[in-house]
Image (spheres, coloured by chain):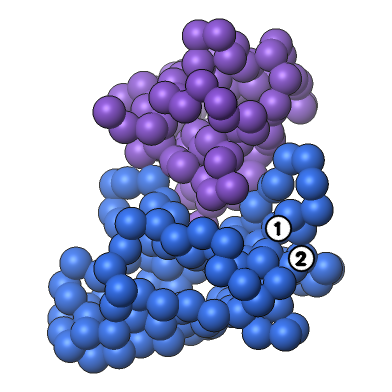
Chain colours: A blue, B purple
Amino acid sequence: DAGVTQSPTHLIKTRGQHVTLRCSPISGHKSVSWYQQVLGQGPQFIFQYYEKEERGRGNFPDRFSARQFPNYSSELNVNALLLGDSALYLCASSTLSGGTDTQYFGPGTRLTVL
Amino acid sequence: QKEVEQNSGPLSVPEGAIASLNCTYSDRGSQSFFWYRQYSGKSPELIMFIYSNGDKEDGRFTAQLNKASQYVSLLIRDSQPSDSATYLCAVDDYKLSFGAGTTVTVRA
């Protein structure tokens, strides 16, 4: 079975621009979470979606938004890009079916803001 | 106070030795704990999870959980050069809260 997929792999933008990152979860997984990982740090939680509803939001500004589609794929949007938004953006999927919720990560999108 | 803290690295061990990684967490109500491995430039890969006090073994990896002391550890036995990576501890509270990671280098 295919794992979590993300697109694009790499992206270069300039300050003030907008970016959209995409994620497709593992088949059968209904929950998608987004994380930001800057160099030398652990991933930081941005959003979690389950059945198209936002289930949680991390401490990120309103420039960050996301949504989940009926097929459980998801988009992360970032407006008015800042240099500090340069990071690896990770998508993780899980079943959220009860018990221990194990999250599996996609390969990530490397965003560079110039 | 950070939610999840890991012992600072880098940690260098000779091939065949045991690598010991530690992690403490602040939320006493946390239930599930995860260890991920991340190779340079790649995304985190799940090694194992633990939710009951005590030890859990999976091949050369053993996770240990002590909820009373709020720590979780990972032992890597018979360390191999391919184990050289950053190891991330994560605590589940509907979202994963990660430590900063410990970088392990296994010397051949």
Q: In the image, A26: left or right of B15?
A: right
The residue lying furthest to the bottom in this view is A17
Could you say which disc has been placed on residue B95 in the image?
Answer: none
Three-letter amino acid code at disc 1? Ser
Expressed as whole percent of the image width and height from the top left, the position of residue B83 reads 55, 35
Element on which disc 1 rests: strand
Residue placed most toward the observer, B51 or B6:
B51
Three-letter amino acid code at disc 2? His
**Which mark sits nearer the N-terminus, 1 or 2?**
2
Residue at image coords 55%, 8%? B68
Residue placed most toward the observer, A88 or A47:
A47
Expressed as whole percent of the image width and height from the top left, the position of residue B52 reads 72, 20
Q: Are marks 1 and 2 in contact (CB under 8 Å)?
A: yes
Q: Does residue B52 sit above or below B36 in this rendering? A: above
- Does residue B10 appear in the picture of this structure? no
Element on which disc 2 rests: loop
Residue A24, quarter of picture:
bottom right
Residue B67, quarter of picture:
top right
Residue annotated with mark 1 = A94
Tell me the subunit letter for badge 2. Answer: A
How many callouts does the rendering have? 2
Tell me the subunit letter for badge 1. Answer: A
How packed mark 1 is, by other alpha carbons closer than 10 Å (few <14, some 14-19, many 20 or more), is: many
Residue at image coords 34%, 80%? A78
Residue annotated with mark 2 = A29
Expressed as whole percent of the image width and height from the top left, the position of residue A44 reads 39, 53
Residue placed most toward the observer, B13 or B6:
B6
How packed mark 2 is, by other alpha carbons closer than 10 Å (few <14, some 14-19, many 20 or more), is: many
- Does residue A32 appear in the picture of this structure? yes
